[in-house]
Image (cartoon, rainbow, N blue to C red):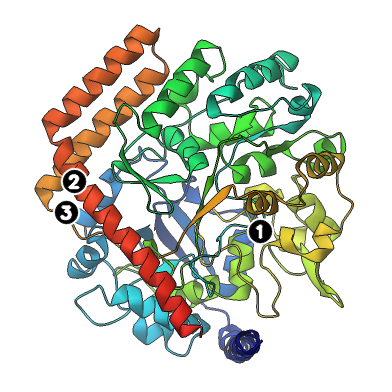
């Protein structure tokens, strides 16, 4: 009880601080910036390139008299090439969202690519996260604040960051699965015949195009083929370089080991392609094309609820009982990211040294980490935030609730935005930054979840036939509740650990190895037969080992174990400060 009272008082103190500083900030920024500017945003997470438009652009214009020009490596061929070119030119961008790992943050500071934001952030509300901010910046040799970590949280490292859905999971067209009689799925391999039967039930989408279970894209490939990594997370593993690490630190696998989950999933996708379940356009399409196919109903399976559900589960479809929901695989234990009190230090936000108006950008960064900014910037996923107050939601006597427009826009219908809030449809105006300032499970200044799907008012709304059926079959109200009740989730404690910088020789070996692994992985999935699959696998292993893969594997294993040590140290530190 004492601990609960202490936490309540801490929340009240935080809310008082937020209200006080927010009031000062709003009064200060009420005077519009006179000069209009265009801000170049180098964003390693963005899946869109160009000028931000729509309702989010309208808010940014009204508050800061500026517009955002997104520069996205994912859209420009992927990899580190664009970062290296712009770094060499001495101008990454006015606002920079990128990795801070492997010494990249220190390199940016040393090269003079980003500025010390400390003079601009003093007394702003973002400094309620000062412990996390300084924890990150203490890794830089020069004093100051050069970067802000993402996904900040006030929760224990053992609390799942995701709610009400995990980041990963076997999400299928539940209506077709129901039509088949909910066949039991004991293993990943058992899922393929079920998906084939679903394809036979619905061989074509409403637009006349052929349906497939799987579709991929290359935008997010790094050390491996990204699409292959995702099902590994169904079994509690995530990648660290060329290593798969189990969330509880009980196992480490080289991704090219013949018994690794990575090779198992490669073979699974190969078998799926042999069954006609893989979209043949996968190797040439972008994330945008991939997402559109879910909107059109051309795909039957997804590893990411935050893609499939917002895209396909419109109110009209869910009323008919159609939509994506998580199926249970008998032997799965899904990987979950634990909250990190020091945030995610792998991906950070900085202000570029060539920025025309660093004070205005600091105000914008501060706003992104404010309750208003958190809601507006993260209104993009199924577990996301509620968007603009007054447009999508309001506070009532019993807490926050969705407006009629909010119900349409956030629950699947691409509604037309009222003229006073901007132009175009809701989806056209969603923030393209794709950057999470706080964890999805965080509470706002009044103690309510930012994630609108966790509001009582939303959970008690008229539940669709789709969700009613899923709840009755699974015996739980939400996916996370089901996973936790059935011990099917494995939380990896959150930490801010960052790997040390690799020298140029190691970096070159990594680039060569990852290129080979990516290329052969794609070719193995689309191999003509099993003999070719095995030949390509053997050739991949041979080539990467000749390039120095084993050396990189040793480095990744060392770093992975160091990171795991840091995870459990973060748990101990949190528990000690929480006593």
- Residue 571: give x, y in percent of width and height: 43, 71
Closer to the chain start, of discs 3 and 1, is 1
Q: Which of the two discs, 3 and 2, sits closer to the camera?
A: 2
In the rendered image, residue 538, in percent from the top left (x then y), is placed at 24, 19
Is the C-beta separation of discs 3 and 2 under 8 Å? Answer: no
Q: Secondary structure at mark 3?
A: loop
Marks 3/1: CA distance? Answer: 42 Å
Q: Marks 3 and 2, Cα distance to the nearest angstrom? A: 13 Å
* Residue 503, position as x, y percentages in the image: 12, 53
Label 1 sits on residue: 55
Distance of label 1 from label 2 (alpha carbons) = 48 Å
For image coordinates 25% across by 60% down, the residue present is: 104
334 shown above or below 386: above
Q: Which residue is mark 2?
A: 554
Residue 502, labelled with which disc? 3
Q: Identify the residue shown where x is 72% and y is 51%.
A: 478
Q: Is residue 328 above or below residue 566?
A: above
Tally the marks: 3
Q: Residues within 10 Å of mark 1 (few under 14, many from 20)?
A: many
Residue 349 visible somewhere in the drawing: no
**Label disc, if present, on residue 250 of the rendered structure:** none
Q: Nearer the viewer, residue 458 or 191?
A: 191
Q: Secondary structure at mark 2?
A: helix
- Judge by depth and name the residue closer to the eye, 337 or 455: 337
């Amino acid at each position: 009880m004492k601990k609960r009272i202490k936490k309540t008082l801490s929340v009240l103190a935080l809310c008082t601080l937020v209200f006080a500083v927010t009031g000062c900030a709003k009064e200060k920024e009420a005077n519009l910036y006179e000069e209009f500017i265009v801000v170049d945003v180098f964003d390693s997470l963005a899946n869109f390139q160009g000028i931000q438009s729509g309702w989010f652009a309208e808010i940014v214009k009204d508050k800061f008299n500026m517009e955002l020009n997104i520069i996205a490596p994912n859209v420009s061929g992927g990899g580190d090439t664009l970062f290296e070119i712009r770094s060499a030119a001495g101008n990454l961008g006015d606002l920079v969202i990128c990795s801070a790992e492997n010494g990249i943050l220190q390199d940016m500071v040393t090269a003079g690519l980003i500025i010390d934001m400390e003079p601009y952030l003093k007394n702003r509300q973002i400094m309620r996260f000062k412990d996390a901010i300084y924890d990150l910046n203490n890794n830089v040799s020069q004093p100051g604040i050069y970067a802000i970590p993402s996904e900040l949280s006030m929760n224990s490292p053992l609390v799942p960051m995701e709610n009400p859905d995990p980041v990963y999971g076997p999400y299928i067209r539940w209506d077709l699965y129901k039509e088949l009689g909910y066949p039991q799925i004991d293993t990943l391999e058992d899922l393929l015949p079920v998906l084939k039967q679903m394809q036979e039930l619905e061989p074509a989408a409403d637009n006349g195009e052929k349906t497939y279970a799987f579709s991929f894209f290359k935008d997010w490939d790094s050390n491996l083929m990204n699409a292959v990594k995702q099902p590994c997370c169904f079994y509690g593993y995530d990648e660290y370089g060329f290593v798969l690490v189990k969330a509880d630190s009980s196992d480490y696998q080289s991704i090219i080991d013949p018994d690794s989950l990575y090779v198992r999933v490669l073979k699974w996708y190969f078998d799926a392609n042999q069954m006609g379940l893989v979209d043949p356009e996968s190797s040439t399409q972008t994330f945008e094309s991939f997402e559109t196919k879910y909107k059109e109903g051309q795909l039957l399976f997804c590893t990411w609820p935050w893609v499939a559900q917002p895209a396909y589960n419109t109110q009209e479809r869910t009323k008919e009982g159609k939509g994506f929901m998580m199926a249970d695989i008998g032997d799965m234990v899904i990987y979950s990211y634990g909250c990190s009190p020091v945030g995610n230090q792998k991906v950070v936000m900085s202000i570029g040294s060539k920025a025309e108006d660093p004070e205005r950008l600091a105000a914008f960064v501060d706003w992104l980490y404010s309750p208003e900014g958190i809601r507006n910037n993260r209104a993009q996923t199924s577990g996301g935030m509620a968007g603009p107050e007054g447009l999508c939601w309001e506070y009532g006597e019993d807490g926050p609730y969705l407006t009629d427009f909010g119900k349409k826009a956030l629950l699947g219908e691409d509604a037309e935005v009222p003229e006073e809030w901007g132009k175009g449809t809701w989806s056209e105006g969603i923030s393209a930054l794709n950057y999470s300032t706080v964890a999805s499970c965080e509470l706002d200044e009044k103690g309510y979840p930012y994630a609108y799907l966790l509001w009582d008012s939303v959970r008690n709304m008229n539940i669709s036939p789709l969700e009613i059926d899923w709840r009755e079959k699974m015996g739980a109200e939400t996916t996370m509740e089901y996973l936790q009740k059935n011990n099917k989730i494995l939380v990896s404690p959150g930490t801010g650990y960052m790997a040390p910088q690799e020298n140029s020789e190691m970096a070159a070996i990594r680039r060569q190895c990852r290129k080979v692994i990516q290329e052969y992985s794609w070719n193995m999935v689309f191999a003509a037969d099993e003999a070719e699959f095995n030949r390509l696998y053997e050739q991949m292993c041979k080539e990467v080992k000749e390039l120095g893969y084993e050396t990189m594997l040793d480095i990744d294993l060392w770093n992975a174990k160091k990171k795991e040590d840091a995870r459990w140290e973060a748990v101990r530190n949190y528990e000690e400060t929480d006593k």
